[in-house]
Image (cartoon, rainbow, N blue to C red):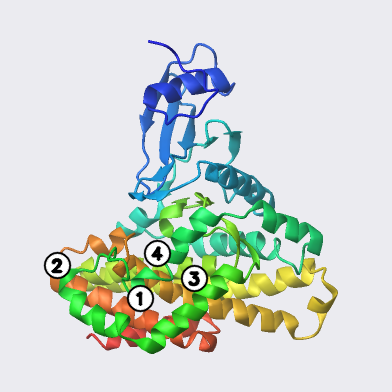
């Protein structure tokens, strides 16, 4: 068997990854007994864990394919891992200890070697298992404020920021978001949506035929495409977070580009709502259900309110743009971010229930009637988040809208 030389791109299998690590890394000792397993379960990339069976030292090798794993219809540049690697390195500087360490990026093989977080768990599954993480709201708001505000025009010099915009142009991944988040869930123009059959008639009436909603979404799509506000993660949901009781690590920023800050914050809020909907639907014991859903409700409120407080404090400490120091400008700017956050909360709730890329929080609800109710609560809340987005200011505003939607389906 001819050994690969890794001088020309090809999609690696487990045996190839073992050879790659031996040849390209100095992380392991020369006599290490290395093992490899493909562990990826995402929509786009191939993820391998390599470890020394003697010492348990380990790394993650993530490689980009030229099509998305979710569908061969999505033809993608394998260069996207370069953006991901660079964003992880930058995040490590802006928000220390809140992203995995990157050991190597290989442009030829379009792969990244990074810290293994096997002692953490994927947050989505942990929430489906009804685990609590009391430090999460504090951790994720620190990450978002640092990663977003510190890459914006109010902090960076304008030439530096414009060069950053150029460096992080990401048209293929942005097109996926433009289609799957902003377009298809609201009209199903190309028949790729996957609507839960018992809800199809309701979705047709309440989403596809709501012309006011569709107009607002059209406005939001063009905001997403044109507002180069900050370097956003672009896919910051609970499936892109590794977590344990005292640690939160943001992963998978391959969708990163310069876009509206609220896109990241809204994704976090929406996915906490999915966890809430799952718990509300699946925890049978009343006291346990109330306890867990109340923790999630408190976390939703904290995410908004801590983000607001930290954002304003960071503004005062880091702003350089002279006109951004005008009295009241910081509050006006933040209000626009929170309005965008509300809108994206609604977009994410909608696309993960109606669109092509759905979430286990909802799809794992076994009881058909219960799932129908959970979906309708989320979608009803989503419509208000989108249509009345400028009215949302505080964490309580976000929670109140969710609870009002729930009351409609008691």
Is 327 left, or right, of 312 in this rendering? right
The tag earlier along the polypeptide, 1 or 3, is 1
Name the image quarter holding the N terminus.
Answer: top left
Closest to the camera, between mark 2 and mark 4, is 4
Crowding near pointer 1: few (<14 within 10 Å), some, many (20+)? Answer: many
Q: Nearer the viewer, mark 3 or mark 4?
A: 4
Mark toward the viewer: 1 or 3: 1
Q: Which residue is mark 4?
A: 180
Q: Marks 2 and 4, how far apart in space?
A: 27 Å
- The image quadrant of residue 202 is bottom left
Write down the residue under mark 2.
367
User: Residue 394, how many percent across, how many down?
Assistant: 54, 82
Count neighbours of disc 3 (C-alpha within 10 A) and say few if under 14, some if 14 to 19, many if 20 or more: many
Furthest toward the right, the residue is 322
Out of 239 and 137, give the one closest to the viewer: 239
Task: Find residue 186 and name its label.
Answer: 1
Dot placed on the residue nearer the N-terminal end, 2 or 4: 4
Local crowd at mark 2 within 10 Å, few (<14), some, or many (≥20)? Answer: few
Q: Is residue 156 left or right of residue 75?
A: right
Q: Tag on residue 266? A: 3
SS at badge 1 = helix
Q: Nearer the viewer, residue 394 or 339?
A: 339
Cα distance in 3D space between marks 3 and 4: 16 Å
Q: Are marks 3 and 2 in contact (CB under 8 Å)?
A: no
Quote the CA–CA distance across marks 1 and 3: 18 Å
Residue at x 19%, y 80% (from the top left corner):
201
Camera-nearest label, 2 or 1: 1
Mark-to-mark CA distance, 2 and 1: 26 Å
């Amino acid at each position: 068997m001819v050994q690969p030389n890794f001088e020309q791109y090809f999609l690696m299998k487990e045996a190839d990854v073992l050879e790659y690590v031996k040849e390209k890394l100095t992380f392991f000792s020369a006599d290490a007994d290395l093992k490899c397993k493909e562990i990826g379960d995402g929509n786009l990339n191939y993820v391998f864990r390599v470890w020394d069976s003697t010492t348990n030292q380990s790394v993650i090798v993530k490689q980009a394919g030229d099509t998305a794993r979710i569908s061969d219809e999505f033809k993608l540049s394998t260069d996207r891992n370069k953006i991901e690697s660079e964003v992880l390195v930058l995040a490590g500087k802006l928000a220390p200890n809140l992203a995995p360490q990157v050991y190597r990026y290989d442009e030829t093989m379009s792969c990244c070697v990074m810290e293994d977080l096997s002692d953490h768990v994927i947050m989505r599954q942990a929430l489906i298992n009804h685990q609590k993480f009391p430090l999460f709201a504090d951790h994720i708001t620190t990450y978002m404020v640092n990663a977003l505000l510190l890459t914006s025009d109010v902090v960076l010099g304008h030439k530096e920021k414009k060069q950053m915009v150029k460096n992080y142009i990401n048209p293929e991944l942005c097109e996926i978001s433009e289609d799957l988040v902003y377009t298809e869930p609201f009209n199903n123009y190309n028949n790729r949506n996957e609507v839960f059959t018992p809800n199809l008639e309701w979705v047709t009436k309440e989403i596809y035929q709501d012309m006011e909603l569709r107009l607002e979404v059209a406005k939001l799509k063009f905001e997403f495409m044109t507002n180069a506000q900050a370097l956003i993660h672009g896919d910051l949901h609970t499936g892109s977070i590794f977590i344990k009781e005292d640690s939160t690590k943001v992963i998978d920023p391959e969708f990163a580009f310069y876009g509206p800050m609220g896109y990241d914050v809204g994704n976090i809020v929406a996915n906490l709502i999915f966890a809430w909907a799952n718990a509300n639907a699946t925890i049978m014991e009343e006291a346990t259900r109330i306890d867990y859903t109340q923790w999630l409700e408190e976390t939703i409120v904290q995410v908004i309110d801590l983000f607001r407080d930290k954002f304003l404090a960071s503004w005062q400490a880091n702003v350089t743009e002279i006109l951004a120091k005008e009295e009241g400008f910081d509050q006006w700017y933040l209000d626009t971010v929170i309005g965008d956050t509300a809108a994206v909360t609604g977009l994410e709730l909608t696309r993960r229930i109606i669109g092509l890329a759905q979430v286990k929080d909802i799809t794992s609800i076994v009881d058909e009637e219960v799932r129908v109710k959970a979906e309708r609560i989320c979608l009803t809340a989503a419509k208000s988040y989108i249509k009345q987005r400028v009215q949302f200011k505080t964490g309580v505003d976000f929670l109140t809208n969710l609870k009002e939607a729930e009351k409609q389906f008691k």
